[in-house]
Amino acid sequence: MSEPRSATLELARELISRASVTPDDAGCQPMLTERLAEAGFIGEDYPFGEVRNLWLRRGEGGPLFVFAGHTDVVPPGPENGWTTPAFEPTERDGMLYGRGAADMKGSVAAFVTAAERFVARYPEHQGSIALLLTSDEEGPARNGTRRVVDALSEQGIRPDWCLVGEPSSSERVADTIKNGRRGSLSGRLVVQGTQGHVAYPQFADNPVHRAAPALADLINTEWDTGNDHFPPTGFQITRVEAGEGANNVVPGSMEVDFNFRFSTEVTEARLRERVTTLLDRHRLDYKLEWQLSGEPFLTDRGDFIDAAVRVIEQTTGQPPALSTGGGTSDGRFIAPTGAQVMELGPLNATIHKADECVSVADLETLSGIYEGILEELLAGQMT
């Protein structure tokens, strides 16, 4: 007879079976609201447009500990890329397969079971525990965590500690804590020229030729040298488009998309100023649009990070590394409230891939670590 599945594994399977492709929550949040009501959590929905957001809280006082995550997933892609269907959770060789297993329904399941066990052991715990869940993390991220944080702030609700369950681990579970992230600033540059026949260049003005030296300067510019927590700011061109598809026509305009991942050594305003100054120096006829996805943030060593490091070392036998590498997460919307923010979740090797998976054993380890962090911070009795 097979061993009964753990509560964390069962919940992860239930979540994965719901095809919650952004912005569809597919019933995940109502199911979690009903489940956690039994542990004393009160749910409040924050719908914005097509996006579902959920705030679940137990307790009224501070300090406030928040688990933050998302119930939406990226599309699974072609069915023939998967060994088993993406939304049919399947266990093979100790791994749980399915879209969202690692990013991040496994973490959400671990949040819930950790909170349930902790509350059962410490019904009169200090402060408050909350879950903030959105169905708009994998999409535009306009109507999700960002909007909920603004709404909560208007009510005077600001987290003290926030644990984001993004898959932070590299080689083994909990080997890395993301204690900060670089900022992300994107630009779209349109360089204007004059369309014409390639045989008569004197009657045309090729925007590609005009822009090429400026783009080379942007590529070769040192924006900063980084610091102890962040690597130097990086600049990458992500799209270049010009022409009408005919090889005998000089294009009339050129579009270039680019992105900065920037450290705390430079500001968004300073990057914009330096780019504009460089383009002006090359005497380009251009338009430039900007989109800021998030400012850089950092949670330095203190009660929150130290508690997580202790629990991880006790659980796994090895201390985690602290890192600010990788992309962005919804932590960028929570950090400006003054909260200490960390990302701690499963291995990230299969996220957004076919046959996405998470170790069943790692789910249990994560749930135990999350519970241990709660115990470190909130186990004392309320006064």
Image (cartoon, rainbow, N blue to C red):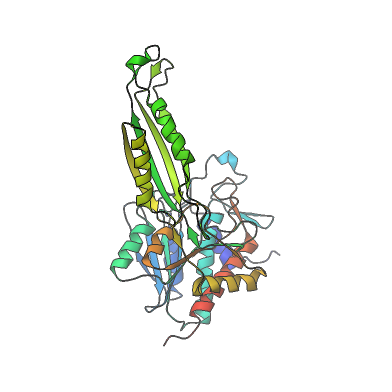
Q: Is 271 placed above or below 192 here?
A: below
Q: Is 33 placed above or below 24 here?
A: below
Q: In which quarter of the image is residue 9?
A: bottom right
Residue 46 visible from this viewpoint? no
- x, y percent for residue 287: 31, 36
In the displayed orientation, state which residue is furthest to the left.
Answer: 154
Q: Would you say 176 lies left or right of 126 here?
A: right
Q: Would you say 23 lies left or right of 15 here?
A: left
The residue positioned 37% from the left and 26% from the top of the image is 207
Residue 10 visible from this viewpoint? yes
In the displayed orientation, state which residue is furthest to the front.
Answer: 281
- x, y percent for residue 116: 51, 73
Q: Quadrant of residue 149?
A: bottom left
The residue positioned 36% from the left and 70% from the top of the image is 158
The residue positioned 40% from the left and 11% from the top of the image is 199
In the displayed orientation, state which residue is furthest to the top.
Answer: 199
- x, y percent for residue 137: 43, 53
- x, y percent for residue 40: 42, 76
Q: Would you say 153 lies left or right of 237 here?
A: left
Which quadrant: the C terminus?
A: bottom left
Which quadrant: the N terminus?
A: bottom right
